[in-house]
Amino acid sequence: MQTKYNMVKQAIKSKILEGAFQPHQKISSESELMKQFEVSRHTVRLAIGELVNDGWLYREQGAGTFCADRSNLNEKNHFTPQKNIAIITTYISDYIFPSIIRGAESYLSEHGYHVSLFSTNNDHDNERKFLEKILTQHFDGVIIEPTKSAISNPNINYYLNLERENIPYIMINAYYDELEPLSIMMDDEKGGFISTEHLIQQGHSNIVGFFKNDDIQGTKRLKGYIKAHRQHNIPINPNNIVTYSSAEKFSKPVEELRKMLEPSSDNRPSAIVSYNDELAIKLLDVLRDFQLKVPTDISIVGYDNSFLAEVSEVKLTTIEHPKAALGTLAADMILQIIEQDKTGTGKQTELSSVLYQPELVIRDSTRSLEND
Amino acid sequence: MQTKYNMVKQAIKSKILEGAFQPHQKISSESELMKQFEVSRHTVRLAIGELVNDGWLYREQGAGTFCADRSNLNEKNHFTPQKNIAIITTYISDYIFPSIIRGAESYLSEHGYHVSLFSTNNDHDNERKFLEKILTQHFDGVIIEPTKSAISNPNINYYLNLERENIPYIMINAYYDELEPLSIMMDDEKGGFISTEHLIQQGHSNIVGFFKNDDIQGTKRLKGYIKAHRQHNIPINPNNIVTYSSAEKFSKPVEELRKMLEPSSDNRPSAIVSYNDELAIKLLDVLRDFQLKVPTDISIVGYDNSFLAEVSEVKLTTIEHPKAALGTLAADMILQIIEQDKTGTGKQTELSSVLYQPELVIRDSTRSLEND
DNA sequence: TCCGATTTGTTCGTATGTATG
DNA sequence: GCATACATACGAACAAATCGG
């Protein structure tokens, strides 16, 4: 429902949630809002009216419209002993996310908490919407996988507000650099390094790498890929690095690989480093089209050791990802913080971020060139 | 303060308090009120708007403005600004469940609700624990996939309690027969029939079937398998029916198939009907071990048209499962019930259970024997 | 205390969009 | 398809309260 008054309403509400307006601070006057949003006074009043009704603002004739003080309002709702943890991920159904969610859910439900699930579909607007919901209603803690972590995040203020409201949060798989939050993730740079080095040690030197460029995992894996080449003094053909955005993930990598494999191409790679198993499986389809045998004709390394790695005919060499264990650990940490907060700041065992060390799982999709 | 809109407001409120308007009775339309009080429409709307906000009236576009039912408003609605739907499934991370959850989550979050997730891991004790939680705390509705639906359920009383507390629930994929609940599922018997018939029509007569025996889907698919044989006058070798429980799903079917394929076996099937794609993929591994080519040497049909069907080298012929659409529909139905309950029992559009008709998706894992 | 500028409150008119029956 | 009823949005005018000078 995209009505004008709703847009105005959301815009004002966002400002409040971002902390741009402090309690009892005067917000813009109706006539100012008319100019800002280019709407009639009627529309502005409608928007403000609803916000007043929901307890976000109050009006004083002659004086102005003011931000309401919601601090003691929360206490009213606070007597809900809900024990509720929110999990925000980019996707729900794809790939390794279900496993992460399962890990967290099972741990939390064992401890009497329950899990509310939100999926941003990699869209910052959705992320904001959910953070709004979490700030408005009662949640004890949040486990969040950042949306487009490589790109600067427009919702930083919402996270700062979480901190102000004492709602603990943990980031998984990646984090927003600006926040320096408690996080649980893999050492993706090392992962990229290991998988590339594995191929180099097998004698490959023409290795094409496919990396997502809008999350931090992708950029770090790429960094590892480059570092491995440097350390082994292997020059990188710039054309061998293919980066793509989440939106392009079903098209660009496949197309680029096709181009490289065409007979006219003068740059046929002997090995592939894939951003993850999901992409690797897609690339396997392309290789099959070109009648290339894996690993005889070409080697390929995946990432995440997902179920996909074992499902295809050629079992993938890949990097281990903790998945469910990561979910469980995130759940464990968030509960620790909550319990600490509850008993008071007495003995804050300083929790620190966790960086999983990657390990290579060697299967059938890579082979040494030197055995020839 | 005698403003016009206040006069209108008081007049309507009085009529309600006098009992002139019964709950859910339509009050005069805006244009009628304009005439009665000789004020502009805007003024009427302002008056009605405040009454709606105070819970005296509710509006329905196109229909009219109605007197609200204030009888149970005080206690319940005051507690519940949450808009929270629970989803209980057997598993979270496996297979098609993530897609179902995604469908429901995206629909619900669009409509301002949020999703709490519970996974029973196919254990009745967990199911009971979650139902307890849902009864104790506030949830607006429940979408549930029954645990071990083929076995009589020890938690029937909890479901009856849900009904008593007016918490609507919908069952997906299967249902407990005793409850006759609103449900959304596939016609699994027909699905089993179609997949088996497909093989029969291709000339197969020695078809082994693998079916789970502790959920209703498995027993129904088996029923369809038998019916297809009967209808085409093909005798069934009892050894060709393999049933297994959820606990055995990783072992028994694979072992049984191995036995059948061993050289010493006198009963090598020419085709396989698999409970689902997940199992079919596992069985494909076995066939590969025995160096049997699919579909040249043996045909196999899956079920659910999951991503697994397209991920292996041999793309599976399988039965379509609505997955995300099923989740969306469940979410839609539960919201309809909730909205109906809110406005009162006025016009219960009778919702009824949905039975998806299965369709065969033909890919590369089956072939006709008659082309030889 | 009054003035005037500003800001919200009340009321009218008009038009078009959308859901219901 | 049509009439009805509510939803959204524009414009205009005047009233009442506030606040700085």
Image (tube, coloured by chain):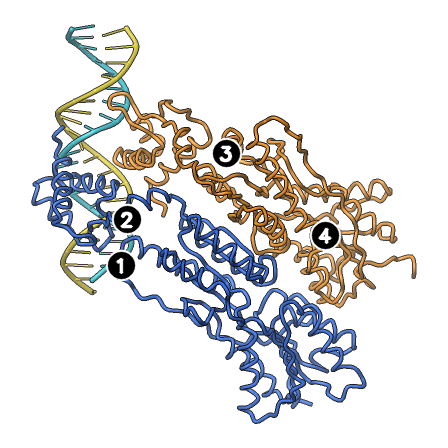
Chain colours: A orange, B blue, C cyan, D yellow
* Same-subunit check for callouts 1 and 4: no
Circle 3 chain: A
Q: Nearer the viewer, residue A353 or A286?
A: A353
The CA distance from mark 1 to mark 4 is: 54 Å
> Could you classify mark 4 by the number of other residues whose Cα lies within 10 Å: few (under 14), some (14-19), or many (20 or more)?
many
A70 lies left or right of A102? left
- Percent x, y for residue A68? 36, 28
Residue for badge 3 = A158
Circle 1 chain: B
Element type where label 3 sits in the image: helix
B322 lies left or right of B95? left
Nearer the viewer's eye, disc 3 or disc 1? 1
Quadrant (top left/top right/bottom left/bottom right) for the C terminus of chain B: bottom right
Circle 4 chain: A
The CA distance from mark 2 to mark 1 is: 14 Å
B147 lies left or right of B366? left
Q: Nearer the viewer, residue A115 or B273?
A: A115
Q: Nearer the viewer, residue B124 or A216?
A: B124
Residue A266 appears in the rendering: no
Residue B270 appears in the rendering: yes
User: Which badge, 3 or 4, comes first in the chain's sequence?
Assistant: 3
